[in-house]
Structures are given as structure tokens and as C-alpha cells.
Image (cartoon, coloured by chain):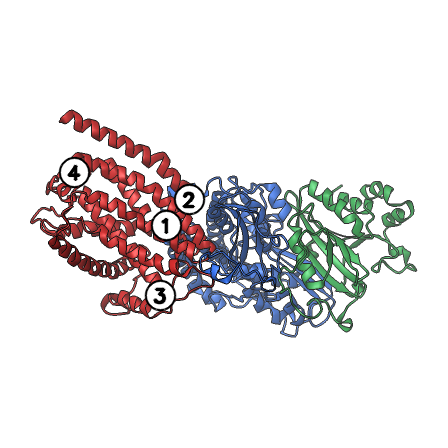
Chain colours: A green, B red, C blue
Amino acid sequence: MTSIDNWSATCRDFGALYVTRPDFSKQGIHLSAYLPPEALLDMAQKLKDEGFTLLTITTAEFTEGFVVSYLFDSFTESSRLALRVLLKDKEKAKVPSLYSIYQGAEWHERESYDFFGLIFEDNPNLVPLLLPHDLAGPPPLRKAAGALSSLKAINFQGKLEYADPDFPLAPEPQEPAELATISEAATETGPSSGNNEGGA
Amino acid sequence: MDLSLITFVQILVAVIAIICLMVANAVVMVYVERKVAGFIQRRPGPYEVGPWGTIQAICDSMKLLAKQIFVPANVDLVLFFLAPVLAFFPVLLLFLPIPFGPYLTPWKTPDGLVLILAFAGFGVLSNLLAGWASNNKYGVLGAARAVSQSIAYEIPLMLALMAVVFQAGSLNLSVIVEKQGWVPWEWNIVTQPLAFFIYLICLVAETNRAPFDLPEAESELTAGFHTEYSGMGFALFFLSEYANMLLVSFICATFFLGGYKGPIIDGFWWTIIKAYAVMVFIVWIRWTFPRVRFDQLLNINWKWLLPLGLLNLWITAIIIKVVN
Amino acid sequence: MASWLNFINPFTIDDDPGTYLGDFYTDNFEKGAQKGNVILNLGPQHPSTHGVLRVLVELYGEYVLRSEPVLGYLHRMQEKMGEVKTPYQYLPNMGRVDYLNPIAWNWAYAGAVELLAGIEVPERAEYLRIISAELNRISSHLLWWGAFVLDLGGVTPILYAFEEREKINDILQIVTGSRLTMNYFRFGGVGQDGDERFFALIGEFIPYMRERLKMYKDLVTDNVILRRRLEGIGPMDRDLCLRYGATGPILRAAGVDYDTRKAIPYGLYHKFEYRVPIGPPNDNFGRYIMRLEEIEASLTILSQAIESIPQGKHIIDKAPKPAYKLPPGEVFFAVEGARGQVICHILSDGGKTPYRIKLRAPGFSNLSLFAEAAKGTILADAIAILGSLDLVIPEVDR
């Protein structure tokens, strides 16, 4: 059992909505997991305890909402994890700030606040970082409705480990054969036993 | 004090001559400093204006003369303009007791050293006023540094000079030179090496030159107390910096290096040569060393120079007592 | 206060509340200084901030009680430009993100695109990439070295550093065609093959630089004032780096063996044998020594590279054209820049231009730890710490 398997299982413990294992040699990450926003802090704390660092935060806007990707890396082993949050309500999008765990997140979050207008709750200094305070118009990296892509247009390759049926990226329900058996088991038995299943 | 009319006229002539000397010295030293810095940094230095760039310094001073004098908002106008004047003019008086040559002493006063040490305080005052009056936080920080640095370093400087005074038995600078011989081993640098060493460090600190240029530390305080000065205001600070350098170099030559005495014929040329050798040394270390930190600067003074200076004074006093 | 009093008291400020606008870029300093303290604004134009960085500090005497860097004075919206230009058009921007280390950024972007599109790079091109990247790393470290000693008040070393940097620029100019904002990489290779003169000059440069490093040690590193200014100042331990995402020499000085070239090998770095310097000491002196030793490591890589470079093409035959479209997908690509880990994150929906580009600048994360590291130090030390982070403001602001 590799540590990536462990992290995959942990993500599902925290109620991950969509977990994939991308090919590291093609995408540069080992694990990609969409978490519910309320689980983000706990997960980050766990990563911090294991010696992971937060390298960067990428926000992108899709038709389904904002996706905030947190890229974590460990100094001791090669395991790069992308934890993501999908915020469906664009107008009232709020994410918990990681400031209390990773103080370096403050600036990355302020950058997303600048570019997308995302509100990071409990960020101690949520004021413009890179842009002028009196910039007119919508946040500059927000896209016009016509220019938006859906999440599915971005081909997030990788082996699917678990998908919540309601998640936009989840495969169509009429083709259940493509789902991995593990994820099926996890959906039936709930997240608590997902750890054992994922670790097996 | 026998301040007769003749002495007065003598001093007046001397002051005018000293002003010329200070200005000429600044022009020469700007050129020397740039050329020495260029040599140390493996670049040519000024070479475009005039032969070997000799007219560069004059062009620079013309530029400073023609520049607008910028006055920031909310400055204290009186002090703002008084400070550069105070920086420049008291230095004139400090040159008076220095024996440039056997017959070329502006004012042969028996209290020469007292005069120098008393008026040297004006330099600090001008730095303080400049920093305070220019309504600038860098200026205030620079002024605070200038005051604590100058006051701290005046003490070991005085102690070092006092040891020489003990030895010569006089505060009169001419007498101090007369007591030294014309060959290097008869100079006070041989009998007072520790005092010379202390004086050399204090001299750099007193003139606010690198590595002790804390009041104007460029990378920390932009330009310290003279941040807001431009044009002639800046030029006067500049002139006074070089004048102070010249002064401490002359004092160094007088007290430790035999003054106007030299191997062939005694004369002012020996004073000049020795003083400029010291100046080149100051320039040399400026372009070689990084800057010390402020607490380190004060530690060097209070923990090392001051006890060493006192010790030196004691030993000198005891030896004089025993020998006599 | 009456206006005539302004004449006497230089610190009288206008009482009209309309004239006081406050600070838009930080809430932390809004309330002003505590009694007896001074809030000092270092920058945006200040000799020690190496560009247009503004650092707000609250001083108690000379002690820094708190500080906060304020960014954005050189922000050029590089990420937005990446979204409106095709990948090929966007490539020259990479030389301008970090003007001191353009090759690393070239590599980050070209590498990300190649990874996403599945483009194979010829072996000779990989060698040329490593040669140019290591030369560029040396030149970046050299300039840092000079500028850092300048921060400490030593004026001369930067001119020595520039002399060596000129030599590197002369070498890189042969293949890249420029001396500062180099745009050398192409998708599938490099822009130009190195000629005989290129390799001959590198062969001359390696022993020359080794001699110079010895001289640097004698002249600058062993200077007692410099040692006293660096040793024990600004310690940054592993936990601090971890919380702020600091990478590069700062992280390695903290004793963490993490170099992207070894941890996540890219290019052909796995073929080379070199030692990545690791701390402690984790103070300013440690970071200083780390960078000087990295120059030596880069020289080792260079000497191996010019000995073993194979013959072949410098770019693939069917290299992407300007109108090249990225396939849909997502990629993270990390390279080790001179300042730390440079990451290019591309999200593509298969359109003409990438859907979203995120550039992770190492200096951005490194600078964010300044406020914590500088707390309680003396102003001069805070400036030394700022210098030891090796900031390039265009990279921080992007």
C-alpha cells in the first residue's frame, strides 16, 4: 500500500466527492480529489501533520462554478496531491481560509480574491494584493458566459477511484460498469468504511 | 586670551584660505574617491570629461549649484536651511589650530585640542537638525543614529588623543609636532600604537564613512538625515563630509605621523602628503567592507574602544610618571 | 492645530479627515502605530527592495515589531495574457516573468505544454536545455550575491558579480539571441543549436568560475563584518518553510533535502551526478552559502553536460506552429528555478488558447514568510533577511 492509496482513502473519509488517480508522468500529480468545502480545513490539518506543504492555489471558473485547486507536496516523498473544492453558487462563493494551518495560504487566497472575487472566510487580510483597490468592472479572470467551459470539457484524465453520483464530473449512471468496484462499495457502505476498502 | 587685532586679521585671512582649501579638497577628493573606487572595482572610473576625467568633479559641482532646492511639505524652514550651514561653517574653525607647516599655523593657541573637540560637536548638531527638520522618518532615524554614534565615538577619540597630549605635555598642536622627530620611528605612532589604532577607527566613525556610515546607510535609510536635501543643501553636507575627512586626517598626521616633519625639508607638503595618505586609506576601506549593524557599532565602541582607550591612558600616565 | 504651528512642529499632520485616505492594501496597519512607535514605509522606491516592492514596518526604535510586504506595483496580469494568447504566442512572456532566471520559466511552460500534448524532446535538446538552465542559474545567483552584499553595505562585490554575469550573458547570447529576457525554448526542443564557439566558451568559463569562487570566499565570505552580519540572523526552520510553502535555497538551508531536479526529475537531470547543498545553518549565512555552493553544483552539471552532449537534432521535425492548439486536459509541471520551485499549471479545454494558466512563482511564497521572519529583528537585519530571500519583483507580482 503506497501513501497515495492512503491519501485517497483519507480523502474519501472526509467525504470526497470525486477522486481520481492521474498518471504522474503525464499530469504531474498523483491524486486529485474534490472535497466538500467544510472538509477542507480538517484535511489540510492532516496534511500539515504529515509534513506536506501548500505550494499554490489555482482558481478557475467553469459553468458549474468555481474550482479551487490546492497543490500539496511532501518534502520527504514524491506525492503531489491536488485537493479541489467546487463552489457551485458563484455569487455567494465562500471557501474556508487555510490561513490558520498554512499561513502562506493568505497571499494565494488574496490572489484568488483579486482575480475571481472569491471570499475566503477567516482570511485575516482579505484586501487586494496584486490589483489596484479601485479597479472597475468584474474581477479580471472571470469569464463571460459565452466563454465558459464546463468541467467535462477539461479532460481530467486519470483512473477514477470514486465519484459521487451528483458530482458534475461523475460518469453517466447508465454505464455503471465503468465505475471501479471500490468506489461502488464506498457509495453503498458510506465513507466510514471507505478507508478499509480503499486501503485493501 | 590675547585676541589682538593682528591675531584677528590673521584668523580672518586663514578662514578665507581654509574655505578655499575645503572646496578644493572636495573637488580633488571626489575625483580621487571615484578613481580609487574604480580601481578597486576594476572599472575605469570617470574618464569622459576632460583629460582622465579630471573635470568631472567640477561639472558635478556646477550641476549641484544649478539644481532646484526642493523643500518638502511641512518642514521646519528655519532649521531645514540652518542645518547644512551649521554642518559646513564650524568645520572652518577646527582647522585654525592645526600646524600645517613650521611657520604656517593659522592660530597658535595653547588650547588647540580643546578648541577642536569643542567645535566638533556642531557637526552632530547639524545632522540632528537636518534629520529632524526635514519631516521625514528616514531623516529622524538617521539623525538619531548620527547623534548616538558621534557622541559615543567622541569619547575614545578623545582618550586616544589625550594619551598623546600626556606624552607631549601640551594641548598646543604645534608643540605636539615639535616633540616628534623627522624619521618615522620618532613619531607618536611608534610610542602610541594603540592610541593610533583607536583613533583610526574613531576617525571613520566620526566622519560617518563606511563601514560606519550608519546615519546615511543607503540600503536601510535611503540617505538618512540628508534624504530630503537637494542642490546646495546637499552640496554643503557633501562639502562638510570631505572637510571633516580632511580635518581628521590632518589631526591624525599632526598627532601620530609627525605633522610637517619629514626626511628632507620640513614643510607643509609633508602634512599634506600624510593627510592625503590617511584619506586614501579611508576611501579604501569604504569600498572594501560591508556595513556593520548599529548595535555592533555601539558595542565596538563601549565594549572595546572605550576600555582600551582608558587602559592606554593609564599606561601612558604611569610610564610618564615613572620616567619623569 | 493652527497652521502657523506647522512652522515649528514638523510632525503636525493635517487634521482634515478628508485628506487622510488610509491604506488600501492592508487592514493590519489601518489603526496606525502604537504610542511611541513609528510606521515606516520602505518602498515602493527604496534601495533595498530590489524593485518596486513596498514593505510596511512598525518600528520601536530600530526594532521591527511587525511588517507586511505590499505587492502589485509590477503586476502585469501574466495569467490573463496566457488565456488570450495561443501557447506559442505566450512563450516569449516567460522570459519576462522573472528577468533574472528566464530559462527556468521557459522550461516550466514549454515542459507543461509538452507534457500535456505528449511531445517528445530530442536528447540533444534536453542537454541544451540543461546547459542553458544551469548557466542561467549561475548568473541569477551571481547577481543575487552582489545585490545581497550591497544590501549589507558592501558596494564592490556586485561589480565583480557583473563581470562573471557578462561572460554568461555572452555565452547564452549565442544560442538565445538575447541577454536578459531570453526566449530559448520551443515546444519540442530549443530555438537554436549551440555551435563550437558556444561549447568552447563554456569550457573556458567553468575553470574560470571555479577560480573566482575561491576569490569570493577569500574576499567576501570570510570577511569578519559580513560573518557577523549574517550568522545567526533570520533563522528559518523547516516548519516555517512548510507553513509558507518556501522552496529553493531557503528550504534547503533549513535542512530539507528537496530539489525539484532530484525529487521530481524532469528533463535528463537523472543522468547527472551532482551534490545538492543542504543546510544547516538555516540563517542568513546558510542561505548565502547554499547559493554559492549551488553555483559549484551547476558547474559540475555543466562540465558533465558539455562532455557527454550527443549529436542530433535540437528540435523535433514537426514542431508546433504558432496556431498550435492544446489538447484538452490538465497538467502541473514543476522545475527548479534559481529561487525555488517554478510550477506551471495549465487547464485546457481544447480551445485555441489555454482555458486557465497558473504560474506559481517561488518568490511569491518565499516573500510571504518575511513578515514572520523579520518580527523582532533590527531594521538592518530585516533588510538582510529580505535580501536573503532573493526577490525578483516581476516574478512575485507576475
Q: Is residue A88 left or right of residue B215?
A: right
| Residue B6, above or below A149 | above
Q: Label 1 neighbourhood size at 10 Å, few (<14), some (14-19), many (20+)?
A: many
Q: CA distance from mark 4 to mark 3?
A: 43 Å
Tell me the amino acid under the disc marked 2: Phe
Position of the C terminus of chain A, as image quadrant, is top right
Q: Nearer the viewer, residue A29 or B193?
A: B193
Q: Which residue is mark 2?
A: B294
Q: In this figure, which residue is indicated by the disc labeled 1?
A: B213
Do labels 1 and 2 touch, CB within 8 Å?
no
The span from disc 4 to disc 1 (Cα, nearest Å) is: 33 Å
Q: Nearer the viewer, mark 2 or mark 3?
A: 3
Q: Amino acid at mark 3?
A: Gly
Q: Give percent across and percent down for residue C181.
A: 51, 66
Quarter of the figure with residue A189:
top right
Task: For the residues labelled 2 and 4, say whether their Cβ atoms are less than 8 Å apart.
Answer: no
Mark 2 or 4 closer to N-term? 4
Location of mark 3 (residue): B231
User: In the rendered image of this protein, does residue C128 appear above or below residue C293?
Assistant: below
The residue that disc 4 covers is: B170
The reply to whether the C-beta atoms of the residues labelled 4 and 1 are less than 8 Å apart is no
Q: Chain of mark 4?
A: B
Q: Amino acid at mark 1?
A: Asp
Alpha-carbon span between mark 3 and mark 1: 21 Å
Q: Secondary structure at mark 2?
A: helix
Along the line of sight, the residue nearer the viewer: B127 or B248: B127
Which element type, helix, strand or loop, lies under badge 1?
loop
